[in-house]
Amino acid sequence: MGLDFDYQEGQTPLDEDEKEGLLLPAINTRGELDEFEQLGVENAIAWLNKRKLSPDKILTNEFVRRLHKRMFGTIWKWAGEFRTTNKNIGVDKFSINIELKNLLDDGTYWIANKTFLPDEIAVRISHRIVAVHPFANRNGRHSRLYADTFIHNGFGLPYFSWGSKSLNKQGEARTQYLSALREADKQNYEPLLKFARQ
């Protein structure tokens, strides 16, 4: 298998075992992989559009995993499964379940107590999913679609635009997004909120 990718800033490199989980052996380039993964994302969106999901159904470990599997299950054998290795980002592999439960519990609390407006709850959850980094790869794409599902299905608000550009390739939108994530790491969510709706 010829998977030897150049990784952009902020992307998580795959381990050799994870590369072996590719279900489409004809893929040899990052561009080909991106195309197939985009089809998976579109199929997941079509699946989501046929469902009415309340916040309590979205804020579950099961839904976090199910959405990742829906997005990438035709491409990666490990889609929807929590990672078994440590990465250049994210919590220790043994802490994933605990940290994910903590963030979902926080989301439930924020809704019940109207701690933040819906946009901020969704963006905070998206950011925390990226910080936990539960999956071997595609955590950013997953966390953004998760936030879209949460805001649209849970609150009837429009999907986020996320800069209205592809965030897979290096460019101004990706640079802005990564900068906004770093600010959110410091508990300044304004840049990420602005980027999500720009």
Image (tube, rainbow, N blue to C red):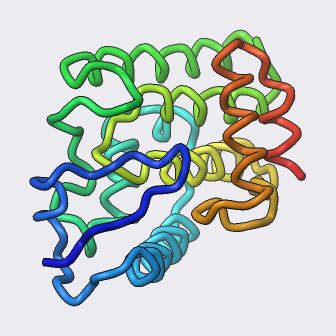
* Residue depicted at x 42% and y 53%: 138
* Residue depicted at x 46% and y 80%: 31
**161 relative to 48 in the view: left or right:** right
* Residue 56, percent from left and from top: 51, 32
Q: Say above or below: 124 vs 11.
A: above
The residue lying furthest to the bottom in this view is 26
Q: Say above or below: 183 vs 133.
A: above
* Residue depicted at x 57% and y 54%: 145
Location of the N terminus (image quadrant): bottom left
* Residue 128, percent from left and from top: 54, 26
Among the 4 quarters of the image, the one containing residue 94? top left
Nearer-the-camera pick, 164 or 124: 164
Nearer-the-camera pick, 40 or 89: 89
Number of labels in the image equals 0
Q: Say above or below: 121 vs 68.
A: above
**126 relative to 158 in the view: left or right:** left
* Residue 196, percent from left and from top: 79, 46
Nearer-the-camera pick, 153 or 144: 144
* Residue depicted at x 40% and y 81%: 36
**94 relative to 33 in the view: left or right:** left
* Residue 85, percent from left and from top: 18, 34
